[in-house]
Amino acid sequence: MLWDHRRTPELRTYGGVGSGIFRSDDDGKSWRRLGSGLPEQGPDVGRIGLAVAGEKAYAIVNRTGGSFEGFYASTDGGDHWRRTPADQRLTDSQSSFGWWFGKVWTDPKDADHVHVAGVPLMTTKDGGATWSADDTSIHVDQHAMVWDPRRPGRVYLGNDGGVYRSDANGDGGWTKARHEPYTQLYSAALTPQDTGRISGGSQDNGSLRSWGGPRFNEYLGGDGEENLINPTDVDNVFACYQYGNCFRSTDGGDTLTYFADRTTYKRRNWFTPVVFDPKDPSVLYYGSEVVNRSTDGGVTWRPISPDLSGGPGPDPLYTNYGTITSIMRPRVTAARSTRAPTTAGCGSPRTSARTGRSWWRAAPG
């Protein structure tokens, strides 16, 4: 199985003519593309998930744009394939980002019992004729599964929430592993007023804090991104989820007020930068394609720069290219921009003196 995809600083393509299922009958010396019921080779074939159990084989195919294309089954080792009956739950399980999944797992003792990765865990017990979805007993976004060869019926599952164990062949009965340092933090916030007060934005596990409940408890959902704690007021905190959806709080995060809609923006980065002015924490900066500035703790905002990003990228699907990825405010204000939707960009630093009256390119790029 091959997935034709590429990503550049201003464009990502998650499918192409190279995507497909291939089989070798001579120990890998030569390969041929399989068809006979599979989608035709073309630019709209995206990520494919494949599982083989004896002569039976299963494949989930997603389109280049990320949506579900179909689930296919073969009973002769891949010589011929049939598209299984449509099921809305299976279609919806891939959302608009099927390229995030692309996994199929078969029960080693029952080839008709199949699990498929999606936002929920999808399961069929009749080779794809009917489906059930588990989106309540486990965290979303499934990525890995393995049967324990020493314990019949025991299955381990990995997803964006951690690791789970089932003793029912993956058909429910999940127990979450509690002691694992797997949480991925995008950001961390500290305060000199209370060194035990820590918050951070975590990948698909929200914004977490060390106070106000069990350590660490979630106080804002989504993909946790920027987190800030006012260095002069421990109860004044800020938290964001993906693409610049940011909130402020004056009670340690117990209640949150959305403020991103008061900023000026056309495009916002997955990790939108928000920073305090180091001389005055009532002054904050927020980056979209322009730099926004607040002088009242994030209540009101106004733009202080032109578009520093160089304009939007050419990607027709992912329009968040062309954004500011980081802002630094020492004695002057500097912003780094990029066409890429991640903080690991390749844009050019821009610098402004005072409060953004003028901007100039500080380095080529």
Image (cartoon, rainbow, N blue to C red):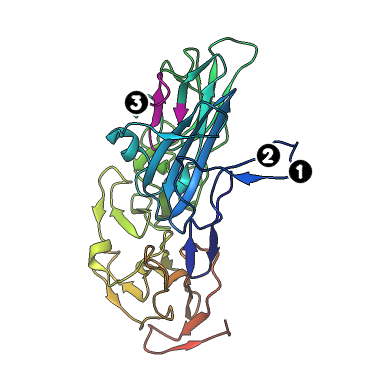
Which numbered disc, 1 or 2, marks the residue that appears first in the sequence?
2
Q: What residue type is labelled 1?
A: Lys
Mark 1 touches mark 2? (CB < 8 Å): yes
Considering the whole magenta stretch, tell me its main secondary structure: loop
Task: Please tell me whether mark 2 sits on a helix, a strand or a loop.
Answer: loop
Decide which of 268, 43 is in the foreground and name it: 43
Q: Residue at x 46, y 27 (%)?
A: 115
Above or below residue 196? Residue 131 is above
Query: Picture coordinates of residue 266 (x, y %)?
Result: 30, 71
Magenta residues, as a range?
115-131
In the image, is residue 55 part of the stretch drawn in magenta? Answer: no
Q: Residue furthest top?
A: 152
Residue 218 in sight from this viewpoint: yes
Residue 24 is marked as: 2
Which numbered disc, 3 or 2, marks the residue that appears first in the sequence?
2
Q: How crowded is mark 3: few (under 14 residues within 10 Å), some or many (20 or more)?
A: many
Q: Residues within 10 Å of mark 1 (few under 14, many from 20)?
A: few
- Mark 3 lies on residue: 131
Q: Which amino acid does label 3 sit on?
A: Trp
Decide which of 18, 65 is in the foreground and name it: 18
Task: Please tell me whether mark 3 sits on a helix, a strand or a loop.
Answer: loop
Above or below residue 34? Residue 306 is below
Q: Which residue is drawn at 51% across and 39% down?
A: 49
Mark 3 touches mark 2? (CB < 8 Å): no
- Mark 1 lies on residue: 29
Mark 1 touches mark 3? (CB < 8 Å): no
In the image, is residue 117 part of the stretch drawn in magenta? Answer: yes
Left or right, residue 154 beside residue 279: right
Q: In which quarter of the image is the N terminus?
A: top right
Residue 198 in sight from this viewpoint: no
Q: Which amino acid does label 2 sit on?
A: Ser
